Amino acid sequence: MANTLDFHKGHGTGNDFVLITDPDARRELTPATIAALCDRRFGIGADGLIRAARSASLEYGAESLAEDSGAEWFMDYYNADGSVAEMCGNGIRVFVRYLIETGLITLERGETIAIGTRAGVRDVQVTAGGFAVDLGRWRLEEDGPLVHTRGVEVARPGVGINVGNPHVVVALADDSELDQADLTVAPTLDPAPEAGANVELVVPAAQLIRDGVGQIRMRVHERGSGETLSCGTGIAAAALATRFWAGPTAPNQWRVTVPGGVCAVRMFPTEDGEHVSLSGPAELVYTGTVDLDALHQA
């Protein structure tokens, strides 16, 4: 009997994912299998894999249900190398689109759903232009590392931003410096964070603020995946870092351009502190079935 797996392929501003349904979390997902599925030459190809499982079926889903009993579905996310990731801002938007399109949930424009993640429960809302996710409270790390990036002549200080997963954001001088950066190799962080970090390189637009909205351009190297066309939590981290650098008069709304498109970021007060939200498109592009035995032989 063939060992097959049905899947969807989706992306958010070019940040792409293999999505599978496993409500009872019965399928064994080894790092080797995930890496093979995400391989762009011998597999399906993706920046990561997302399993749709019920929170009640996962040991680590219990924390999500304790936080919010309505978090029925858990975004079980893995990087392209098979390693675990706490959160994915583009992935969670694509995940909710997947849940809707496959009939696992019903959600209309303006409605919100609670989704379990390893970083905690995140609320996602259907919008006119896609989906918006409340990434929750964020944290500025006190001591950012020095960042050495191939193609950038001088090492730059980075600022650490945590939005459920760790980021280091670096400001570059201009677009040409951003374009010349070689992110085929992971930037070196000194000192290196124990759990690693995603690294964002940022350049402000010539007109930083337009109609009350901040404008920046960004590229990213994601731990476990390499350079990607977009990183949702990285987009939020880049906007937060730029606002921090710009000072108290900087806006709370940002437009961030990445190689795969544009997303919006908004910072807003809540009872438990300031939250940051990310909004943008989420697309499903095809479905298929893969023979796992043949995949491992490739």
Image (tube, rainbow, N blue to C red):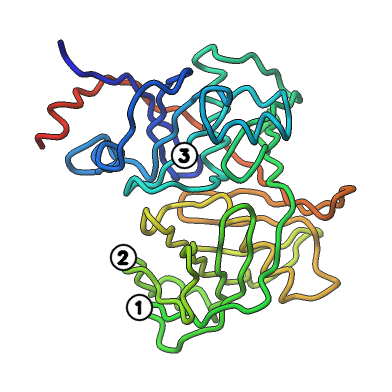
> What residue did someone put label 2 on?
184
Q: Is residue 91 above or below residue 267?
A: above
Specify the quadrant that holds the C terminus. Answer: top left
Q: Position of residue 14 (x, y in %)?
A: 44, 44
Q: Amino acid at mark 3?
A: Tyr
Element at label 2 = loop
Q: Amino acid at mark 2?
A: Thr
Label number found at residue 64: none
Residue, far bottom: 154
Q: Is the residue under label 1 in contact with that under label 2 (CB below 8 Å)? A: yes
Q: Position of residue 107 (x, y in %)?
A: 67, 18
Question: Which is in the foreground here, disc 3 or disc 1?
Answer: 3
> If you read the primary sequence from the N terminus, does the residue marked by circle 3 or circle 2 appear first?
3
How far apart are the alpha carbons under marks 3 and 1? Answer: 29 Å
How far apart are the alpha carbons under marks 3 and 2? Answer: 23 Å
Q: Amino acid at mark 1?
A: Arg
> If you read the primary sequence from the N terminus, does the residue marked by circle 2 or circle 1 appear first?
1
> What residue did someone put label 3 on?
77
